[in-house]
Image (cartoon, rainbow, N blue to C red):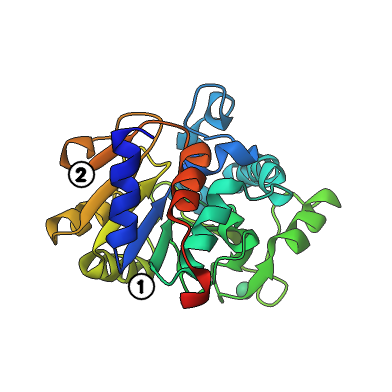
């Protein structure tokens, strides 16, 4: 075991309140492409076509948005959690995990068995849809079935309002309550673990920044460099799906104690 690996294990072992902050790099090993990577979905679609204001103001933009969304959702729907997601569930069972703040919209933490009350989806979820007028919620599959049956711009069956997946689009306000909750955990954790996030998307990346400012240790496991590397106590640049399970296993956390 190299030094960084041992240091990471020691930090986790000594921590009492861990905030795990997860990003797209955690899901790539489950076959979900990072849509910002070359060859990703934004090579074929123009992100500026899917700004929130365009979606709500143009039927044509909404139709294109649903078309893109159906393709993207298709890659997520049947994806399975990988060893990194399972390692986080193991960490929760040990009693050390305070919160799991995720930028991912793919439900893989839930599929791995992490408790819903630990998970804070700051960019929303692709698995539900809401009416922008009356707030009525729908399972995504129900709306996808309507799209598959020929609708191109589905509307609410209660009020005929516009429907939108519960993901945060470009130009759409972040969910205030979830951001506040995430910041609260950032202020009270003693270790912040960044897992598979390049920390370039704000305000999401402000969560680990807040943790460091409040004195928490920072551990970064990400394949690529991040703007916070110079403030981290340890940085490991290996695929998170390989390194995190090894660290958690090396700790042999006692799950019966949690
Ligand atoms: Zn409605």
Residue lying at 62% horizontally and 59% vertically, measured from the top left? 112
Q: Nearer the viewer, residue 213 or 202?
A: 213
Query: Judging from the image, what secondary structure is the residue with disc 2 in?
Result: loop
Residue 139 on image: x %, y %: 70, 66
Q: Nearer the viewer, residue 87 or 117?
A: 87
Of badges 1 and 2, the one in the foreground is 2
Query: Judging from the image, what secondary structure is the residue with disc 1 in?
Result: helix
Residue 70 vertical position relative to residue 186 in the rendered view, above or below: above
Residue 207 vertical position relative to residue 189 in the rendered view, above or below: above
Q: Provide the residue designation for mark 1.
A: 177
Would residue 182 be found to the left or right of residue 33 on screen? Answer: left
Residue 10 on image: x %, y %: 30, 52
Mark 1 lies within 8 Å of ligand 1 (Cβ measured): no
Would residue 217 be found to the left or right of residue 67 on screen? Answer: left
Mark yes or no: residue 201 visible: no
Residue lying at 76% horizontally and 54% vertically, measured from the top left? 144
Quarter of the picture containing the N terminus is: top left
Residue 166 vertical position relative to residue 138 in the rendered view, above or below: above
Answer few, some or many: residues within 10 Å of disc 1's Cα (few below 14, many 20 plus, some between 14 and 19): few
Residue lying at 69% horizontally and 47% vertically, measured from the top left? 79
* Measured Cα–Cα span from mark 1 to mark 2: 29 Å
Q: Give the label on residue 233, or none.
A: 2
């Amino acid at each position: 075991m190299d030094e960084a690996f041992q240091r990471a294990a020691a930090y986790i072992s000594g921590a009492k309140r861990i905030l795990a902050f997860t990003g797209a790099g955690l899901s790539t090993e489950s076959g979900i492409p990072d849509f910002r990577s070359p060859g990703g979905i934004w090579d074929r679609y123009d992100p500026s076509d899917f700004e929130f204001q365009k979606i709500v103001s143009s039927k044509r933009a909404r139709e294109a948005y649903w078309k893109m969304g159906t393709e993207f959702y298709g890659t997520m729907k049947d994806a399975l959690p990988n060893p990194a997601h399972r390692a986080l569930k193991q960490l929760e069972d040990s009693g050390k995990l305070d919160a799991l703040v995720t930028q991912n919209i793919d439900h893989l933490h839930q599929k791995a068995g992490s408790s819903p009350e630990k998970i804070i989806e700051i960019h929303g979820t692709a698995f539900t849809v809401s009416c922008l007028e009356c707030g009525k919620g729908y399972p995504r599959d129900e709306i996808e079935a309507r799209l598959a049956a020929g609708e191109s711009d589905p509307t609410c069956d209660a009020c005929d309002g516009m429907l939108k997946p519960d993901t945060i689009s470009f130009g759409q306000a972040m969910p205030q309550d979830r951001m506040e909750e995430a910041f609260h955990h950032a202020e009270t954790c003693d270790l912040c673990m960044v897992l598979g996030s390049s920390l370039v998307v704000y305000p999401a990346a402000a969560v680990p920044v807040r943790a460091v400012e409040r004195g928490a240790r920072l551990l970064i496991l990400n394949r690529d460099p991040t703007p916070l590397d110079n403030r981290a106590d340890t940085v490991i640049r290996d695929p998170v799906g390989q390194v995190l399970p090894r660290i958690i296993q090396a700790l042999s956390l006692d799950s019966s104690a949690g």
